[in-house]
Amino acid sequence: MSEMGNIVKTASLERWFDRYFVQATVLPTFLVMVCVFGVPLVFSFYLSFTGWDLEQPLLAGRFVGLANYDDVLTNSVFKKAIYITLGYTAATVAAQMLLGLGIALLLNVDLPGMRVFRTALIVPMMVTPIVGALCWKLLLDPSHGVFNQWIGEKIVWLGRTDTAIYAIWLVGVWQNTTYVTIILLAGLRSLPSEPIEAAAIDGAGRLAAFWFVTRPMLRPYIVVALLLRTIFEFRAFDNIYAMTGGGPANSTMVLSMYTYLVTFVQFDFSIGAAAAWLMLLMSLVLCVLFILVIRRAL
Amino acid sequence: MAAVVGSPRMRKLESALIYATLTVLVLAFLFPVIWVLGLSLKTRAQVFAAPPLYLWWPTFENYAAVLARSDFLRAFTNTLIVSTSAVLLSLGVGAPAAYAFARFPFKGRSILFFALLVMRMLPPIAVLVPMYLLFNKIGLATTRLSVVLAYTTFSLPLVVWIMRGYFEGLPVELEESAGIDGASRFGAFMYVILPLARPGLVAASILCLQLAWNDFLFSAVLTNSATQTLPVMMTAFSAGDSGMDWGGLTASGMLVTLPVILFSFVAQRHLVAGLSSGAVKG
């Protein structure tokens, strides 16, 4: 190309951003993601079809077809863990959404001092999850916990199959309700005020204005919060590890906990990989949903 | 923001009701942390007192005991090293990529971007199993580098997501004029764009720092007693030979989490901006 052509080329912004700059900037991110994230994923996919243990070389596993998946899917603890995970996720997310929306609506009222309340309510979300869970474990302690001292009983909250899962649920709600609040508050702040004022002038009550005007406009934010919380509660681990370890009698055994125990306690890496991949597939469905939703919102 | 409406009396009543509800909520949400903070300032006898003590002269003996332990200080140093390295690596690698995602319509851009997002959404335990095996085989397991790499893969999508939003908000004319002034693409990015995107960098690094500081699972699996981070080290207090050490557990828990809480008060504006932009903007 001629000298003149080069000058014209560099003068135009489109050409100025040339291809190599893109490659140089994007490549490192993808190298890291592929090497540290992608390769292990592919490897575990391979492992899930083989019988393998830690003493063997990496690729020396014996091909067993779908036997690992068969083992996992017919395992009663795993099957129960699916129901517990889904139930826990649904109950936790539902409570977080309702409470989170309520708090966001309160914080959105134009009164002095609201910042103080918002700052204070963010605290549970900031507490290191494992520390938060251990705090609750102390509060719920059978003999010295403050809750039992107040009611004058010695209930083993975390050791009973009829209470442990509710305790886990409570901690999940306590921890991340504010996450929903933050997203919805950002949504509420971004809404135009005219439609709501117009509804008030037309004589709509507070509830009617919320239901027919605010709620539809807030919908994208609600959906995003809902999906993000679902994705994150589906993988819940720290609270359960710290408070019950999946017990008693597997009553709080969620999929993360099951995969952890199979892999790092029973050291059955092939079964662990199969369980992990089943979990991946389930969360992939959630991810695809999430992306479809935010793509439409873009 | 919604305003309180109605007659003056109704308005007063409603404001009072809103304040009352919020106060109750704040008390309920803060109670576990405040109570445990209180426990950490009690002697052993005071912790086990029944009915519970509400007023007492605070003691710092639990903190003194925890801070005198060499393994606590080592875990503290590890946490500092690991989380700052993960933040720096994530920003160094992720910010340029976010810039490319924001500015250049290259082939496969949206597929790559959503692939990154999906990686952020996958359950960590599913990646941890094979990561542990591979790291074990290549001798990376039990090193600090292994957790730094693990945290980086979880922070990178976050960095790219948040920073892309900030870069998109900057006018293209900035690079155009820098280009006319003779700056290279890299120069324009480094000296014109990055300084202007500082709020985004701050928000992203706070979220990454929190992610690395608070992690338990990866550190529990990938480190040993010499390289473990604080959240893992402190669980030792809950399962010692002589049962649960209430003083050690409460004091170390507060030492782990209070810096994050105080930091979040100072940096709240950035944090909220980062969380909501990362979550909502797409």
Image (tube, coloured by chain):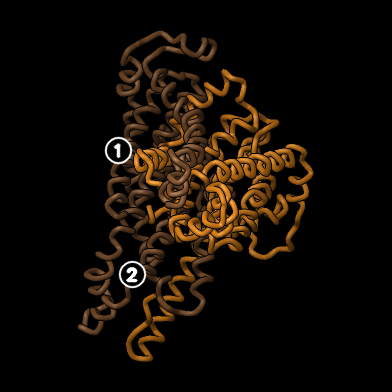
Chain colours: A brown, B orange
* Outermost residue, bottom side: B8
Q: Is residue B128 left or right of residue A166?
A: right
Left or right? Give the position of A201 relative to B43. Answer: left
Amino acid at pointer 1: Val
Chain bearing tag 1 is A
Which of these two is toward me, A266 or A42? A42
Q: Is residue A83 visible?
A: yes
Q: Secondary structure at mark 2?
A: loop
Q: Are marks 2 and 1 in contact (CB under 8 Å)?
A: no
Helix, strand or loop at mark 1: helix
Foreground pick, B3 / A9: A9
Q: How far from the left and from the top, in percent, is residue A270?
A: 42, 18
**Number of numbered discs on residues:** 2
Chain assignment, label 2:
A
- The image shows residue A277, relative to residue A87, as above or below, that is above
Residue for point 38% across, 62% down: A184
B107 versus B55 height, above or below: above
Q: Which residue is mark 2?
A: A191
Residue positioned 54% across, 60% down in the render = B270
- Disc 2 vs disc 1: which is toward the camera? 2
Direction from residue A211 to residue A147 in the image, left or right: right
Picture quarter containing residue A259? top left
| Mark 1, residue position | A285
Between the residue at mark 2 and the residue at mark 1, the CA separation in whole angstroms equals 30 Å
With respect to residue A192, does A34 lie above or below?
A: above
Where residue B31 appears, as percent x and y from the top left, is 54, 60
